[in-house]
Each structure stands twice: as structure tokens, then as C-alpha cells.
Amino acid sequence: MSDSSRLDSTQVAEDFRRAAHQAVDWIADYLADPREYPVLPAVQPGELTDRLPQSGPETGEPIERSLEDFQKLILPATTHWNHPGFMAFFGSSASGPGVLGEMLCAALNTNAMVWKSGPASTELEQTVLGWYRQWLGLPEDFFGVIYDTASMSSTHAMAAARQLADPECRQRGTRSGLTAYISTQTHSSIEKAAIALGIGQENVRKLEVDDEYRMRPDLLASAIEQDLAAGRKPFFVTATVGTTSTTSIDPVPEIADIAEQHGLWLHVDSAYGGAAAIVPELHHIFKGVDRAQSVVTNPHKWLFTPSDCSVFYTRRPDMLREAFSLIPEYLRTKDHPRAVNLMDYGLQLGRRFRSLKLWFVMRYFGHQGLQQILRNHVQWAQDLAAQIRADSRFEIMAPAPLSVVCFRLRSTDEANHRLIDKVNASGKVFLSGTVLKGKYTIRLAIGNIGTTWADVEQAWNLVKAAI
Ligand code: PLP
């Protein structure tokens, strides 16, 4: 094929059509059962880099060659998050409807900086987040916006809180003494937000947790009192619904009482756990969240929407606007009461049409379909925990309120590390670990859309066989 044919959009479209049919067939087979791939690739760092050309092609190649190399080079170096045996970290699996939405998002390639540059993207985002807000049982005054990750959502929460606490910070820079409160189990993204926003790590209080890894409201109250007495300005507290290590659920109502008493911005990080609040019998995990100023939950974690898709709700969108709205002449558009310009609600200007994939997922599975998948995951975690508890060689290290079980072999840390390595080398399961009460602990996280009870049993059998 001559290079000039690539200047012909019809030819490019035809090449796309041919290759996309092949790719879609592959994707459908892959999503139907990724078990034929090892969940963890047998590659060493640098191995793929060494196999890839060190400079890009001067002349174009047939698109099929990229597809061939995807199979030959990329897949063998891929950790398969879609694999039903992926039980590390938190599950984050794509689903057919989500992939379709992502594909169409890439095809439209809109950029909803302002309403006019993406009316469909802007309005669908508001509508879909309205649906999700209802499923989550959050009040109507929560305004929703999609960012890429929970880290960014929480950074926006802290920036909005800083704006409320210190309205001059835009001009003057961050005022010293602003103090934030988290627990030792809070995700590192909150501390990173404090670093990025100039709050400073030394102004983040990391409170000890109770026996079940939950923030202690008594320690929160006394830390705030101490900081006030020292002339500091407490401004922000994060409560977590589903902490990263153990999925513990902080006592949000008690934390909300204290936040309200002292005028702190309460942010709820439910990046993983929030999805479970759409299940009626699990909705109690969101008790008190309606009193927060902001909440983040990631459909790309436990709602089968391809990465990236982090949903952020706040009842103070005015603070986001005050913190971030800055309109240069070249982006000025006519005001209209119904035209939301999403660039005013965050740091980024450009934004992808992420709501499309969430819309496809929510419509395809429906509220009830998604509830059933989540309900199964939580039930299987309880069933697995019961089996582990019944085996005296192991100990359960934390309550399992959602779909993650933390346990360890009653032995040394080294023995537990070896056990995980052996299980992971099977290629059938990928487990990760954490440290709880000073002891290395295995986390088995159920959350993948393709995972069945048989996969969970297989993982448990592999663990027992690896002792
Ligand atoms: N918050 C919690 C509770 C998490 O567990 C995680 C990641 O696992 C994050 C935040 C960060 O998520 P993201 O990768 O979307 O930034």
C-alpha cells in the first residue's frame, strides 16, 4: 500500500472497518472467557521494551501488522485485569457494553470543555450521574461530574474545601495552618492531594483506627480541638466507605457530627465500596453520606465500566467553580441557564465523553442486574471467609463487610509471601497483600464481572495447596 493512500479518508475508514471487525471478534471472545491467558504475564521488567523498535516507522504499515503485534507482543506482557482470577487490589473489569461505549467515545472524540463543544457529552453526563445518584440514594442537591480517577476526584474535593475555608487562596496561595484529617487506613491519594494543593503533609493528621480498622471519632474530635487550640484551621476530613486494605467502613454519621460542629468539609471516599450502596441490603454502608459535602465512587472499579471513570458528587459545586473557573476570551460562550460548562468544575480543560460507557453499562445490566452481580460477590466473600475461619492453619485478619477477605497463614511473613508467589505463579489467580497489625496479610478481592464461585473456590484451593 502506498503512503498516499493514507491521506484518503475513505481508504483509512475501509482499513478500519476490516481491522475493527477482527478486533471486535477478538474482544468478544476475550471478554467471554479470558481464562485462556495467564492472569499475570511471565515477563521481566524491560523485556517488552527490548522487543519493541526503538523508533517509530517512517512509512505506514498495514493496520493488521499492529493487530498481529498486539497478539504477539502486547498480550504476553499484559496483566489481565479482566481475568476472573484477578483477585488482587480491587477488581476493575470491563464489560461488553462498557467497551462499546468507550469505542464510540473514541470515534466521536468530542471534547466537552464547554457545553457548545460537547452538548451531548455535557448533558448525558448530568443525566447519567442523576440516575446513579438515585441508585446510590443520595440527595438531589448533589451535583455530579466525572473525572478520570478517585485520586483526581478527591483532589478536587480538597481544592473545593480549601476554597471554602480560605476564599483568598486563589490569589494569595494556600494559607498556612489549614489542617486535614484522615485515618491510618485512608488511601494515599488524599495525602497526595494535600501535597499537590500546598496544604503540606505535616498538616494532615493520620488518626489511629479501632480494632476493625475504622476511623475513631473520639480521636478526630480531640485532634481538631488540639489544632484549634494551637491556632490552626481544621478544614477537611475524609471518611472512607471501603478502605483499601480491609474495606472497613468508617462511622460516617459520627464523623459528620464532628465535621458539622466545626465547619469541616466532609469528603467520603467510596472509590471501591460505593457501588455496593446500590444494593438495598447493603445500602447501610452509605449511612450518613448524605451529610457529606462530597463523595467519590469509581464505576471503573466495581461497576464494570472500563477505566477510567470516577464519579464525583458535591453539594457545593459553587466551591468547585470558585476554585477553578477561569475563562479566557477564546473559550467564552454565550450564557444560557441550562448550559453547563464542565471546564468550570475542575482543573482540566478537555474532557472525554466518559458518560457514554457508563450509560451503556447502566442500561444493559439495569439496576437489578448490577445489584445481583454485586450481591453475589459479597456473598461469595462471606462464604470464603467462613471456610477460611474453619481452617485452623489460617487466621482472618479483618472483618469482611464487602467482597474482600483478608487472611494469613498462621506462620511467618516470609511463609505468607512465598504462598502468594506460588499461587500467583499458577497463572490462574492473582492475589495481593497488605500489612495489618504489623503482619503481612493476603487480600483476596472479588469484584470481577466474570468471576464465579468456582473461581473463588479454585483460588482457595490453590492457596491451601501452596502451603
Ligand atoms: N480511594 C480508595 C479507597 C481506593 O481504594 C483507591 C484505589 O484503590 C483510590 C482511592 C485511588 O483510586 P484511583 O486509582 O481511581 O485514583
Image (tube, rainbow, N blue to C red):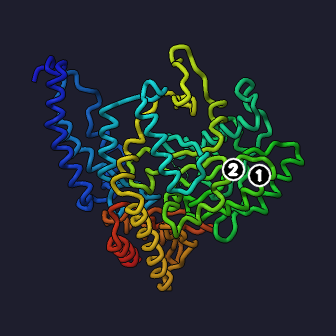
Q: Which secondary structure lies at badge 2? A: strand
- Mark 1 is surrounded, within 10 Å at the Cα level, by few (under 14), some (14 to 19) or many (20 or more) other residues, namely some
The answer to whether 429 is drawn above or below residue 291 in the figure is below
Asked if the residues shown at circle 2 and circle 1 are in contact, with their CB atoms under 8 angstroms apart, the answer is yes
x, y percent for residue 108: 32, 31
Residue 374: quarter of image? bottom left
- Depth check: give the residue in front, 331 or 6: 331
Identify the image quadrant of the N terminus.
top left
Q: Amino acid at mark 2?
A: Leu
Q: Which residue is at 73% across, 29% downward?
A: 169
Q: Mark 1 or mark 2, which is nearer the start of the sequence?
A: 1
Q: Give the Cα separation between the discs numbered 2 and 1.
A: 8 Å
- Asked whether residue 394 is in view, the answer is yes
Q: Seen from this angle, which residue lies furthest top?
A: 329
* Residue 96 in the figure: left or right of residue 337: left
Q: Which secondary structure lies at badge 1? A: helix
- Front: mark 2 or 1: 1
Q: Seen from this angle, which residue lies furthest right?
A: 229
Q: Amino acid at mark 1?
A: Glu
x, y percent for residue 149: 50, 44
- Asked whether residue 418 is in view, the answer is no
Q: Which residue is mark 1?
A: 260
Q: Which residue is mark 2?
A: 266
Q: In the image, which disc is placed on residue 18?
A: none
Q: Which residue is at 65% across, 40% downward?
A: 316
Q: Seen from this angle, which residue lies furthest front?
A: 337
* Residue 57 in the figure: left or right of residue 160: left
Q: Is mark 1 within 8 Å of ligand 1?
A: no
The answer to whether 416 is drawn above or below residue 392 in the figure is above
x, y percent for residue 205: 74, 51
x, y percent for residue 345: 57, 33
- Depth check: give the residue in front, 160 or 123: 123
